[in-house]
Image (cartoon, rainbow, N blue to C red):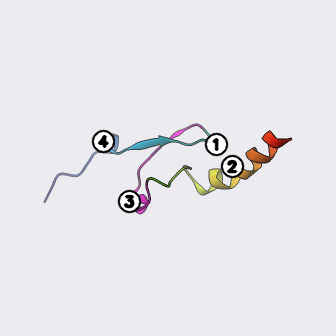
Amino acid sequence: MGKAKSKSDLPTKICPVCNRPFTWRKKWAECWDQVKYCSERCRRRKSNIDKQIDI
């Protein structure tokens, strides 16, 4: 059995809403390239931010 990766070895991205880094998760293995937001909350908040910019 192989050695498990440490969390620091996993890829990370920066969330455009909260500007915090977030780390790869196993449930994102198939769609990591499309993942933009760190959480469902940030994904929902992005539309509010877009509306504030337009005003």
Mark with earlier residue (2, 3): 3
The span picked out in magenta is 19-32
Tag 4 residue:
9
Label drawn at residue 36: none
Real-space Cα separation, disc 2 to disc 1, in angstroms: 6 Å
Residue 4: x, y in percent?
23, 52
Tag 1 residue:
17
Are discs 4 and 3 less than 8 Å apart at CB? no
Between label 4 and label 3, give the one nearer the viewer. Answer: 3
Label drawn at residue 29: 3
Helix, strand or loop at mark 1: loop
Residue 15: x, y in percent?
56, 43
Helix, strand or loop at mark 3: loop
Which residue in the rendered view is the most extreme toward the left?
1
Kind of residue at disc 1: Val
Pointer 4 local density, CA inside 10 Å: few below 14, some 14–19, many at least 20: few
